[in-house]
Image (tube, rainbow, N blue to C red):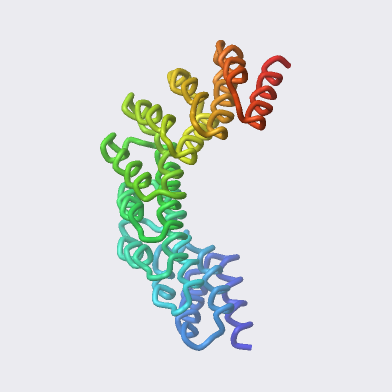
Amino acid sequence: DREIEALDHAIVAIATGAEAQSERVIATLSEWSLTSEESVRVGFAQILAKLVGSLGSNWVNAVLNDPSPAVREVAASTLSSLSPENAVAVRDQLLGDEADRVRMAGAVSLGEARDGEALDRLERLVADPCEGVRTAALRSLGTCLAQDCHWVDEDRGFAWVEEGIRRGGLSAIAAVELLPRLPGSRARARVAQLLASPSPDLACAVLATLRRQPDPSLVAAVRKALDHPDASVRIEASEVLVDIAEPSARTAILSRVERERDPQARSALRAVVRRLDA
């Protein structure tokens, strides 16, 4: 009965935006933080998250120290909605949480933030010990750069990329995806270097990014990738040449077909030529 009554208060708070009702929800959640079932606390945290616009960061304080990472994760997922001047301490605590899932949710949420302080927090998470958190932070930084890059100078952006590449794995792939969003010729030069990387994962990550964001200035580097030691890179490079609408793409790919020893790669390259001719 007590839970049903509190849920009624929460529904009224969401429907009316009444501050008094909202405060009762917060008080209830705080009271139950150590006594109710985890699923109940998670549910109430999700209700409070929907009220974040009217409650500011106050409601988050009720769940910051909840013993369940699932509850704290809900709070972390709303970090972009909290005003930075009122939420610095909240961000610090949740992004320093011992649970990877909480930090990861915070990293994802901050990708929607629009302030330099959020970038500072994401920058710190690029060196997080958890690969999932690092990857989420790098992708959120990419989201921020795609929307507005005036917060970031070239050296700072390259530091994120190089740290991600150094870490390897999914972090490296996410870091490579940042490069086309960095301004200047230095970024294009680094892309060209990575296309020649002995790591097929890195080279393919660059090519996949170029398929989404074609850059005709990199045609020469992409053509060189047609001779990469890894067949998957050669195939992906041929696709990028088509996407860029490079006039010499057909000739370059046919030349690769004549020299191709991998039967599957040869078949894939011929399919790309047929697509060009269609």
Q: Nearer the viewer, residue 267 or 238?
A: 267
Q: Residue furthest front?
A: 261
Quarter of the N terminus within the rendering: bottom right
Q: In the picture, residue 182 is in which quadrant?
A: top left
Which residue lies at the image location 56% right of the left edge and 11% below the top edge? 247
- Image position, residue 39 (x, y; %): 58, 78
Compared across the picture, whether 238 is left or right of 223 comes to right
Which residue lies at the image location 61% right of the left edge and 16% below the top edge? 254
Q: Nearer the viewer, residue 152 or 163?
A: 163
Rendered position, 51 above or below 31: above
Q: In the picture, residue 262 is in which quadrant?
A: top right
- Image position, residue 244 (x, y; %): 54, 20
- Image position, residue 34 (x, y; %): 47, 86
Residue 189 in sight here: yes
Q: In the picture, residue 8 is in which quadrant?
A: bottom right
Which residue lies at the image location 48% right of the left edge and 26% below the top edge? 225
Q: Nearer the viewer, residue 5 or 174?
A: 174
Q: Nearer the viewer, residue 132 or 3?
A: 132
